[in-house]
Amino acid sequence: MKKLLVLSTAAMLSLGTLSACGSDKNADAGGSEGETKLTLWYPEGDMSPAYKEIISQFNQEHDGEIEAEIEFIPRGNKYAYEDKVSAAATSNTLPDLLAMDGPNVANYADAGIIQPIDGMVKEQDQFVDSVIKQGTFQDKLYAVGPTESTVALFYNVKMLEEAGITPPKTLEEAWTWNEFYDAAKKLTNKEKGIYGVNWTLDYGEWIIYFTGPTVWSNGGSFIAEDGSKADGHVNGPKTVEALEYLQTFTKEGLVNLQPTPTEFEDGKAAMMLMGSWEWAKLKDYPDTEWGITYYPKSPTGEQVSPSGDWAWGVSTSAEDKEAAAELLNFIHTKENVLKLAAVEDKPPARSDAFAELAEWDKEPLNVLKDQVLKTAHPRPSTTSYPVLSTKYGQAVQNIFLGGDVQEELDKVAKEVDTDIERKQ
């Protein structure tokens, strides 16, 4: 019997109701006799039309042999998709292929929801290192994804020029914490209501994603490398120091604690720490001249940037592994990776796909490419990740509002270790 997957507070409280929609190799869906039927799940969204097109093409090329059917799951609330996966795991109704957010790989693998795919992925050497690392749990590969992401520092070109500030143009010149702080302080104009930097105070996954590099660059961590213990890591001295640094921005009013959704676009923030996807949205604001520079680093540490995106794995319910592997590899051909990356203007997860995108070699997108290929760091791999992410996000919100850093992170360590002990 599979272990019950614990994804989030929402997932623990409500597993939801679902119909049996797992693999049915014998059902007649209009295909020829002996045709293998495969099912896939993916959260409903902007990527749906592209995936629908890819699956349709796969079916045409494998007519009479394999027929795939993709179901797009409405998210409804933040954890609706994950809730459905939890319910399917307990009722043995998982699809053959399953999409998952990168940090959930360890949780799904440990729960027996997905199976290792070592040896099943063609051209694995073409995937960027961060994607392979994200999809690996206990030295086995469980998932791969077609796209990547990162967080970088966007800036208003005119505001920086007027302040006499020159943003770094190369990875080697990336600002240190002190240089970033000095720039933010110089760019803040409280009389005009302009903040030095904008960052989103999202309650969910965003917080651990965008603050992670500050922690890692300073030599801190969120959990032991083997995922066995959070105490001494998420509340360790290096992590505390990193969060105290970030807290300085909110304490001194360099960051708006109640920003509007378009604060940067409207010229009310001179810089913005934001995800790689933001550059496409900025094209809708032609009056705002913007650029991108690298995520700031600790004065004593290395350059680090966050990584991770949705990935595909093969569920333990998949009966025909060869057919599942055929579909998994079809989704991740160079051509399809380019197609999927173009939908949301995301960095492709294959190096050979990057090689065909000339615009990513020039300013400002070259910064995003540099980070994906050279400084990417996945979020922690732990079966208690949902608890870690949720509790850490709450703690950091409290910290930005003036809470004691050590006390808040001590609470996180206690909650995560309690969850680890409960699972053990």
Image: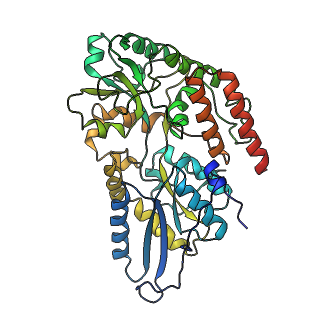
Closest to the observer, 289 or 404: 404
Quarter of the figure with residue 67: bottom left
In this orientation, does residue 117 appear?
Answer: no
Closest to the observer, 59 or 197: 197
Residue at x 32% of width, y 15% of height? 166
Residue 150 image offset from top left, x and y in percent: 44, 37
Residue 135 image offset from top left, x and y in percent: 55, 51
In this orientation, does residue 230 appear?
Answer: yes
Residue 193 image offset from top left, x and y in percent: 35, 16
Q: Residue furthest left?
A: 287
User: Which quadrant does the N terminus fall into?
Assistant: bottom right
Residue 247 image offset from top left, x and y in percent: 55, 20
Q: Is the residue 199 above or below the residue 63 in the image?
A: above
Q: How many marks?
A: 0
Closest to the observer, 324 or 196: 196
Q: Is residue 397 left or right of residue 48?
A: right
Asked which colour scheme the image uses, the reply is: rainbow
Q: Is residue 124 left or right of residue 63?
A: right
Q: Is the residue 62 above or below the residue 309 in the image?
A: below
Quarter of the figure with residue 65: bottom left
Residue at x 37% of width, y 40% of height? 277
Closest to the observer, 345 or 171: 345
